[in-house]
Amino acid sequence: MHIATYLVDIAALGCLMGLLYSDTALSTERRRPFLAAALLSVVAILSEAGTIFASPDQLNLRSWHTFFNAVGFAISPVIPLAITLIFSRGLFRTRKLLLVPTLLNLLTAALSPRFGLIFSVNAQNQYARGGFFFIFVTAYVTNLVLLILITLQVGKTSNYPMAGKLAALSVFTIAGTSIQLLYPTVYTTWHCVTLALLLYFLLLAEFDSSFDELTCLYNRAAFDQAVRQMGASEPFSLIMLDIDDFKAINDTYGHDCGDGVIKTIAAVIRASFGKGYTCYRVGGDEFSIIGGETEKAGLERQLEQFATNLAAARTPGQLLPTVSYGYSIFPGGSRLDFSQVRQEADDQMYRCKRTHKAEDAQSQAGK
């Protein structure tokens, strides 16, 4: 029975590794730590299977029983750390103290075959938890909590609604591993971890596929999803932005130059609209921003700040066109017609574009 379930877990992790190689939703930087976590999980599953086969009820191989326990206890807390590197690769360079529980667990696991710290296997090949078993539990729980906090922080920074999904996934993982901590002969941990890794992959794939590759802003699909999830009772503001004369830039200077312009303007948008605003690239040279600001004065201050930042980014000799924008405010409490809200923002944006064209024509005439 056990071998069948372990084989299913390993097969599932093999499928996950295949997805990691073939899927384009996750970036290369995210795939490597995820692949490491999957490989470590396979080793941990094989180690747990080894403890069963080397136990007195099976092959009764004390040395192997001890070895497999040591390997399993040593690497299990490393798996959440590997996944943490998906989001923060430099975290442990600046905060080395976070590694202390893991390193202490590695040391005690390595010494346990001789001193029985985390576990012991007696002369009759009987397994027992040691007096320092809490070190393993502390390291595993600490790293799991760290993973949860880092993921939530990334979601919060990006204004991405992953808190509910991650909370459910975390409860599932903690509950599954806790069962085996309380009842050592009930082997639930790696079944739960395997499923959690697959679900976490889906969560990250959804997260990564929501971004525009060129600008690192949210893409049109994410914008459409945000619109679908809007409730009529919630007030919001919509800002539409469009780069002026962008087609002429592409035609005259080429697409590489055009891409550079888009990246620079996207960076200014991201820097100008922080907490409370979610920024999207919804077309070639079009951007949208959904925010919680519903006061006209507050929105206009924010847009003035954007215009100031854009002017500051326009260095001598750099090709950086103006950007036209318009906004609309939905006060909430009534039936939401998003097309009407968007039309109002579009109309204002095109009035701004006509003003820019008139100013440009006047400037050219004065030369």
Image (cartoon, rainbow, N blue to C red):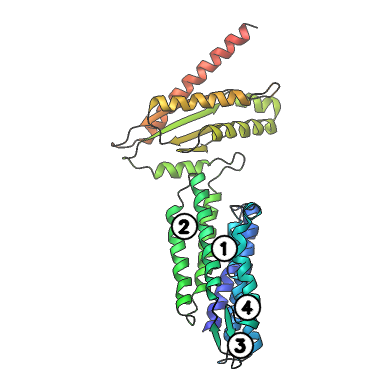
In screen coordinates, is 225 left or right of 42? left
Residue placed farthest to the left in the image? 334
Q: Which residue is mark 4?
A: 70
C-alpha distance separating marks 2 and 4? 30 Å
Amino acid, disc 1: Pro
Tell me if residue 82 can be seen: no
Residue 166: assigned label:
2
C-alpha distance separating marks 1 and 2? 14 Å
Give the structural element (helix, strand or loop) at label 1. helix
Q: Residues within 10 Å of mark 3 (few under 14, many from 20)?
A: many
Image coordinates of residue 261 in percent, x first then y, are 64, 30
Residue 80: assigned label:
1
Tell me if residue 296 can be seen: yes
Q: Is residue 134 above or below residue 235?
A: below
In terms of sequence position, does the residue under pointer 4 or pointer 1 come before the other? 4
In terms of sequence position, does the residue under pointer 2 or pointer 4 come before the other? 4
Give the structural element (helix, strand or loop) at label 4. helix
Q: Which residue is rendered at x = 55% and y = 23% of the image? A: 308
C-alpha distance separating marks 3 and 4? 13 Å
Displayed quadrant of residue 45 = bottom right
